[in-house]
Image (tube, grey):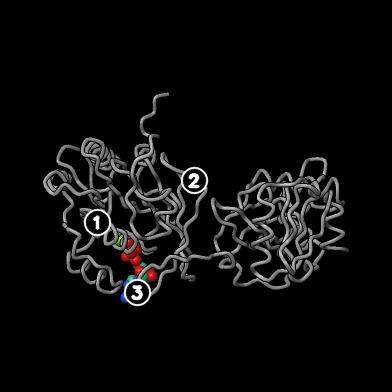
């Protein structure tokens, strides 16, 4: 293919560990990166902290079209970021921004935000498709020509769409989303596109009054409200190099519409439909006239075939009105015949379960030669099919 972009390049570490992790080890010279998130999530804080880290060893430039220099400096003081080495420019004219990059020759330049740039060469108002296309195109060329990293901050609307066109995502090398819930302090970074690394990694940060702090061990972070509750099942999800415990919740109730609702938040819709079909056919659960809602608590995600069993148990628990056994977690892929199949990362999933003090893992049968011993304190309940799993974890 001759894709030179895949030749490993020396990466620039930002010092924000969770951002570096999601990027695949740091920023790749000459790349164009989009950091997208809702207003107020912490994008400006993240890029300022990252630039302060970059500036320790490289040339860093921040172009702000949204805030005054005084506002940027005030944030720098609040989050105790050493911004002395960061050149800061309050500018929204694209031509002047390009000129500044050309003269300043930064190794890393952040544009906060791409939606504020206006070009004399493009039609349309600030933030319009034509303006964003012009600015992104010019900055892409500049990044490649000069081997400069250019990071674009992009606003996302409440419904999750990028304010501005999809084409922005196609033009850049990496898309990093920054998400969180207003009521909770933690924020999650994910790469939804990465020409230079995996898209499975997740970065977790905590928003504190003095800035964003990387969360080194987020294993149990999403389990804040865990307990013995109807319709709840803990699942150890693998995200890149990490295993995290998440809580899969289900709500089941008589429907008023035909066909009944199947709503999936944070889990795969198709797999949910399949799990429901298998529960009906192979475990005798009558769900044909029931709405089924399944979601992952705390805004976490469990897009992983091994989530099948946890989804099934959460649904069964909700349907039967009985909580699962205390201290239990479940993982395993469910086949269309009702069999529970082994999944990857057996040891890491059990490790996360044990690390959090849970005591029972409902899991697929493993060939004895490949099964590692479980961590101390964790009992494994091996199940071969869905009916057996229900018997063990959610008896009638
Ligand atoms: N003085 C403050 N004390 C504590 N947290 C603050 C303060 N000011 C802002 N924040 C936090 O920073 C967030 C805004 O961060 P910011 O980086 O400006 O977001 P964005 O650029 O994505 O709009 C707020 O939602 C709040 O959580
Ligand atoms: Mg901002």
Q: Secondary structure at mark 1?
A: loop
Residue 291 in view here: no
Whole-number angstrom distance, CA of label 1 to CA of label 2: 27 Å
Quadrant of ligand 2: it is bottom left
Which circle's residue, 1 or 2, is located before the other in the chain? 1
Along the line of sight, which residue is nearer the eye, 293 or 32? 32
Q: Can you say whether 114 is above or below 355 in the image?
A: above
Residue under circle 2?
199
Front tag of 1 and 2: 1
Quarter of the figure with residue 39: bottom left
Residue under circle 1?
57
Residue drawn at the location 17% of the way across and 58% of the way down: 87
Residue 265: x %, y % from top left = 60, 54
Does label 3 point to a residue whose CB lies under 8 Å from ligand 1? yes
Residue under circle 3?
210
Whole-number angstrom distance, CA of label 1 to CA of label 3: 23 Å
Neighbourhood count class around disc 1 (C-alpha, 10 Å): few under 14, some 14–19, many 20 upward: few
Along the line of sight, which residue is nearer the eye, 224 or 154? 224
Residue 13 in view here: yes
Residue 366: x %, y % from top left = 78, 49
Along the line of sight, which residue is nearer the eye, 138 or 212? 212
Residue 380: x %, y % from top left = 79, 60
Quadrant into which the N terminus falls: top left
Residue 310: x %, y % from top left = 72, 56
Could you tell me how many numbered marks the image carries? 3
Does label 1 point to a residue whose CB lies under 8 Å from ligand 1? no
């Amino acid at each position: 293919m001759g894709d030179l972009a895949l030749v490993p390049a020396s990466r620039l570490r930002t010092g924000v560990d969770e951002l570096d992790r999601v990027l695949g080890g740091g920023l790749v010279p000459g790349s164009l990166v989009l950091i997208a998130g809702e207003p107020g999530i912490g994008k400006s804080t993240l890029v300022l902290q990252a630039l302060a880290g970059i500036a320790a060893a490289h040339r860093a430039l921040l172009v702000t079209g949204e805030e005054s220099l005084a506002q940027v400096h005030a944030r720098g003081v609040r989050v105790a970021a050493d911004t002395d080495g960061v050149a800061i420019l309050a500018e929204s004219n694209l031509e002047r921004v390009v000129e500044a990059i050309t003269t300043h020759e930064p190794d890393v330049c952040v544009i906060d935000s791409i939606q504020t740039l206006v070009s004399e060469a493009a039609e349309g108002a600030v933030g319009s498709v034509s303006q964003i296309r012009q600015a992104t195109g010019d900055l892409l060329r500049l990044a490649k020509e000069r081997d400069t990293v250019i990071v674009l901050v992009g606003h996302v609307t409440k419904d999750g769409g990028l304010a501005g066109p999809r084409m922005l995502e196609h033009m850049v090398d990496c898309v990093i989303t920054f998400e969180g819930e207003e009521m909770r302090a933690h924020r999650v970074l994910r790469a939804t596109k990465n020409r230079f690394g995996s898209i499975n990694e997740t970065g977790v940060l905590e928003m504190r009054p003095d800035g964003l702090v990387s969360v080194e061990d987020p294993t149990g972070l999403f389990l804040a409200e865990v307990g013995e509750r109807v319709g709840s099942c803990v699942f150890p999800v693998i995200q890149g190099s990490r295993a995290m415990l998440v809580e899969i919740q289900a709500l089941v109730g008589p429907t008023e519409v035909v066909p009944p609702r199947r709503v999936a938040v944070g889990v795969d819709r198709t797999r949910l439909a399949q799990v429901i079909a298998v529960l009906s056919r192979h475990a005798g659960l009558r769900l044909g006239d029931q709405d089924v809602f399944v979601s992952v608590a705390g805004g976490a995600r469990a897009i992983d075939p091994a989530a099948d069993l946890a989804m099934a148990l959460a649904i069964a628990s909700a349907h039967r009105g009985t909580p699962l056994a205390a201290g239990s977690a479940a993982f395993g892929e469910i086949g269309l015949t009702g069999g529970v199949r082994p999944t990857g990362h057996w040891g890491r999933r059990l490790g996360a379960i044990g690390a959090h003090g849970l005591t029972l893992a409902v899991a697929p049968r493993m060939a004895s030669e490949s099964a590692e011993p479980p961590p101390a304190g964790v009992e494994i309940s091996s199940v071969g099919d869905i009916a057996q799993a229900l018997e063990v974890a959610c008896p009638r």
